[in-house]
Image (cartoon, rainbow, N blue to C red):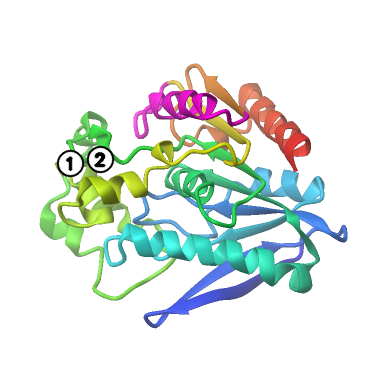
Amino acid sequence: MDIRTVQYKRVDGCSICADVYRACTPQSPAMVYIHGGGLIWGSRKRVVPEQVSAFVDQGYTVISIDHRLAPETKLPSIAEDVCAALNWVFDDCPGLFGIDPNRVAVFGRSAGAYLSLLAGTFTRRPKAIVSYFGFGDLFNDWGNRPSPFHLSMPEVSKEQAYECIGSNAMSGSGEDRLPFYIYCRQQGVWTGEVVGSNPDDRLLKKYSPIFNLDSDYPPTLLAHGEEDTDVDCMESVRMAKALTRAGVRNKLITLPGLGHSFDRQMGDARVRESLEFMLAFLRDNL
């Protein structure tokens, strides 16, 4: 598979890159892939290989993007990175990689799914969105209260947490920053660390896709494991109901017995079926 790494943005001394998995077909649709990691860790390398292979086999050019990470960079600037990545895909990637700018979808996992849903509120929007175990509401208690699931893990002290991060903007990381995320969930301070200290309601509403839906919002597929202990399945259920109320074409898939990152369990027939359903959804909406 032909893979090319390209810098799509540089800001605050931070190079922000994308890995492009090229399809062989001219004027191919593009799949912008956004990694998870609670907006705190993760990178463009953290893809599900079977998904990327399936997309490329179906003729998509897959563009897996990095963005700056919290807490060094706060959510408004992270959203700017995603917006810049989409504008780069629309404007530059037709010439660079032969993609069709009128057939651009966004697929995200977990916090990447949140950013995918947020992309549906941008001025220039993708044509379709796929959200896997994501969320669309920053007002929910899960970001502001200790998580029972994360409290069941070994305690991460404040000192241990802050050893994982720095003061300069960065994009793309491995699991070395994961303890900071666990600390945030154990202490119930995720929203403050990601959005900013004491964010007001206007800011939270602006960056909550569930409150910014209109009839032009892209068709959306949501998939969630019913036993998800990191992001509750009800986040996708509530988002689907809001999309329906707004008159947006959408489909929700819930998977009994499966948890967070269920899509890495490709040996499970239900997971393979959800991938096939996603591909069919994209064929119908791109």
Q: What residue type is labelled 2?
A: Gly
Q: Is mark 2 on a helix, strand or loop?
A: helix
Residues drawn in magenta: 227-249
Q: Determine the residue positioned at 23% across, 45% down.
A: 201
> Mark 1 = which residue?
188
> Mark 2 = which residue?
143
Image quarter of residue 51 = top right
Q: Residues within 10 Å of mark 1 (few under 14, many from 20)?
A: some
Query: Is the residue 208 above or below the residue 15 in the image?
Result: above
Q: Is residue 205 left or right of residue 220?
A: left
Q: Does the magenta stretch include residue 233?
A: yes
Query: Is the residue 121 above or below the residue 269 in the image?
Result: below
Q: How crowded is mark 2: few (under 14 residues within 10 Å), some or many (20 or more)?
A: many
Name the quadrant of the N terminus.
bottom right
Percent of width and height locating residue 177? 31, 58
Direction top: furthest residue: 256
Percent of width and height locating residue 55? 73, 47
Q: Determine the residue positioned at 50% across, 60% down.
A: 82
Is residue 125 something that shows in the picture?
yes
Name the quadrant of the C terminus.
top right
